[in-house]
Amino acid sequence: MTPAAAHYTSTGLDNKKLAFWAFIGSECLLFGSLISTYLVYKGRSVSGPTPHEILNIPVTSVSTFDLLMSSLAMVLALAAVSRGDKVWARFWLGTTAFLGLVFLGFQYYEFTSFVREGLTIKTNLFGSTFFTLTGTHGAHVAVGVLLLLTLLVRSFQGKLGPEKAINVEVTGLYWHFVDVVWIVIFTVVYLIQ
Amino acid sequence: MSDHAGNASGSHPGTGTYLAIAAVLLIITIVEVGVFYVPAFKPILAPVLLTLSGVKFSLVVMFYMHLKFDHPLFRMIFTLPLLLALGVAIALMFLFGAFGLNG
Amino acid sequence: MATATQLSAPHDSGRSGLWSWITTTDHKRIGILYGVSAFVFFLIGGLEALFIRLQLARPDNTLVSAETFNQLFTMHGTTMVFLAIMPLSAAFFNYIVPLQIGARDVAFPRLNAFSYWVFLLGGLFLNASFLVGAAPNGGWFGYVNLTSRQYSPGLNIDFWVLGLLVLGIASLAAGFNFIVTIINLRAPGMRMMRLPVFTWMTLITQIIVVTAFPVITVGLVFLMFDRFFGTTFYSLAAGGDLLLWQHLFWLFGHPEVYILILPAMGIVSEVLPTFSRKPLFGYAVVVYSGALIGFMGWGVWAHHMFAVGLGPIADSVFGATTMLIAIPTGVKIFNWLATMWGGQVRFTTAMLFAMGFIAMFVIGGLSGVMHSNPPADLQQTDTYFVVAHLHYVLFGGAIQGLFAGIYYWFPKMTGRLLNEKLGKVHFWVTFLGMNLAFFPMHFIGLLGMPRRIYTYRPELGVETMNLVSTIGAHIIAVALLVFIYNVWRSWRRGEVAGNDPWEGATLEWTIPSPPPDYNFTVIPEVVSRLPRWSVTQMKAIPDVPPEPIHVPGGSYWPVVAALGIIGMATGAVAHALWIVLLSGAVLIFSIYRWAFEPFEG
């Protein structure tokens, strides 16, 4: 099997990209189940803080903006890698990772203030479902940040040329999906109480 | 031949498009938060917010994730589980009495 | 590690010994690993069944305690579903699918190895619970709040939850792998509607896997969080709803039964045409009905919950959807029968098992559709009537289908035929045993004997039938011994098979038995659905590769990653955070090394 034939695919589509879309489809069911549970248990806590009392819309709006802007940065990073622009590739990859870390910072702040105000993962149904749902999302963001930093390091090692753009594209798919899940969470958990 | 980012089969949005979409996302989010705070919107809060976030969702998926321009197979691979998840969520809400029906 | 043109012994590339098996990324070897491991677990699950049946052979029996009995039926179910049927199917996915589509391997060979090792370690982890006297005991379906910390304070359910989470990872990884493989690695000319039905059923099964497993993952995580961190998901005191578990479990659990049966249906769809010397009747319909079953399988889950009080609307809806799903299933039966009708039928062992599948699965399907009626099900549910149903479809159906596959493809994998005389003994003794074991259960159940009880009173009047059932179970065991002997004898001394002992129609029969490392000397150009049977013959495949074929070497990172995962589970069950963290670090480290290791897949 020559190297050219090694890249032959029946559909002309890249294996990694196909695999990642299948993975994203699977994740729809994962987050779908978590969000369903949150919705099903909404308003059923018998005690403890309620969403209305404790959720901070202004602060969360800012973190939502942050994540949306990180998607922009991601898309610009991909474009830069594809055209072989090392400087901008590193800038945008770094920016995306940074914005991701900022989002995580906001989550850390939110989680710790909730705990201080009496809402933990054990307190009531709201606490259990909220922290599990947003915590799972946050864990996904953290993994995404790790992926981005890995790409950044590879770029600095000179190993992220246009021929490796598929890796950036696939990381981008993951990152945008995580953003899109947050869009749903922000609406369904924070705005529609 | 592997599908190479940047040599996509369809057309490829430029930086301008990406920035425009980012701006739209920003504006919609501001509107959403605004709708949240305006008491007059209370009765139609849910449908309005769901519609607006649906638009954001679609924009990110179609443009940033490039689904609009990519092979239809990707669209199918994403949409099928998405609709399934939606169906499961709605079914569970019915079963737990969310829409006033007793399960 | 490049391998030059093989002129002699194509499969002997100097890669022998334990290390070559541990680091293998070859789909054929991985298939064999799955098959052997799954069969051993199948025997363990069978032993558990024998103990169950011995305890129930007489009323008021005292062979095992109630607590032990709970562990036996829990592990029997969990083992048979996750450690026997699924990996036996996976053995065939791995070995056969790349051959049927004309590929050299799967899309992600190291991920494939990873799936196997995670499965094996997960299965060992689950069974290790016996060593600490704390095997899972809450049923294979783990209903809360019995399985909550309050009512199950021991390690039993911790083993169960963590074991299933680990096994889920293996299944998901394989799911993505095979979806990409089947869509993207087909030989030129192998259009989707030219795929062998077994490959189609594999694809549909993997789509079900990657959509259904996340749901049970979430349900299990909730239970794990409740047990470990005191969350309230299944807490009545906090206003939680115990039915949440049941919904999440069965949203997975029902698609799971289609995961269990579709591959076997695929095997039957290959075996029947070959031994009827006639193409499958209504190929497209069989494919579409498989897809329909996979899709509709998402709409029936609450038929496992007809006794919990869902209300008339939900009961009616799920009753209706359940009746509807019998339609695509029935369609397949007619297509199979029509395939045999007018054909030149050869009654090989594989064919007997395939025909046995049809007969037993129809019986199981009939009792199944009886459950679909909520009022009737109120009498049947949680009784032996359901146990009868599920064993007819899973043993009479899936297991027989898998045995058909073994007799059919054993020659391809080993180069030798299984002995037909012994095979027929295996078949007929199994047939007798399974009907003796499971048919009386219909009556036992309707007479009122519940499931999952360790004993019963003589007044119930089911004593004789229980004894008959126990005898039947032991007859199955005897049949299995015959089979094991057959395999042991035939592996080295069976009749030599050659490329195509059965005059099959599909691509796997064009290459040597066993195939060389690289499978095909040149990737075939497919011009029809039945390449070896059609009038338009495809270009002959040369005996020797025209140019050197590079076959990737092995890798140990998949094993290390798998060890990291099982380490995390072990640390969790031991409540030792440092083990969890250390194993997590091993996992992350191995993923990085895996990602950056030079590997030409």
Image (cartoon, coloured by chain):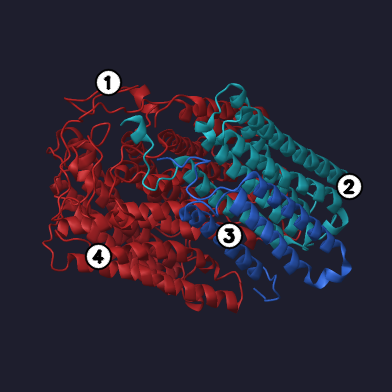
Q: Which residue is mark 3?
A: B85
Q: Is residue C219 visible?
A: no
Question: Which numbered marker is on residue C543?
Answer: none
Determine whether C290 is above or below C499 in the image. Answer: below
Q: Report helix, strand or loop for mark 3.
A: helix
Chain of the residue displaying label 1: C
Picture coordinates of residue C435, whole percent (x, y): 29, 62
Q: Quadrant of the N terminus of chain C?
A: top left
Picture coordinates of residue C554, whole percent (x, y): 38, 26
In terms of image quadrants, where is residue C410? top left
Callouts 2 and 3 on one subunit? no
Chain letter for the cyan colouring in the rendering: A
Chain of the residue displaying label 3: B
Q: Which residue is mark 4?
A: C336
Q: Amino acid at mark 3?
A: Ala
Chain letter for the red colouring in the rendering: C
Q: Quadrant of the C terminus of chain C?
A: top left
Q: Is residue A137 left or right of residue A168?
A: right
Q: Amino acid at mark 4?
A: Trp
Measure the C-alpha gap from mark 2 to mark 3: 33 Å
Q: Which residue is mark 1?
A: C14
Picture coordinates of residue C331, whole percent (x, y): 32, 70
* Other residues around mark 3 within 10 Å, as few (<14) / some (14–19) / many (≥20): many
Query: Disc 1 vs disc 2: Cβ atoms closer than 8 Å?
Result: no
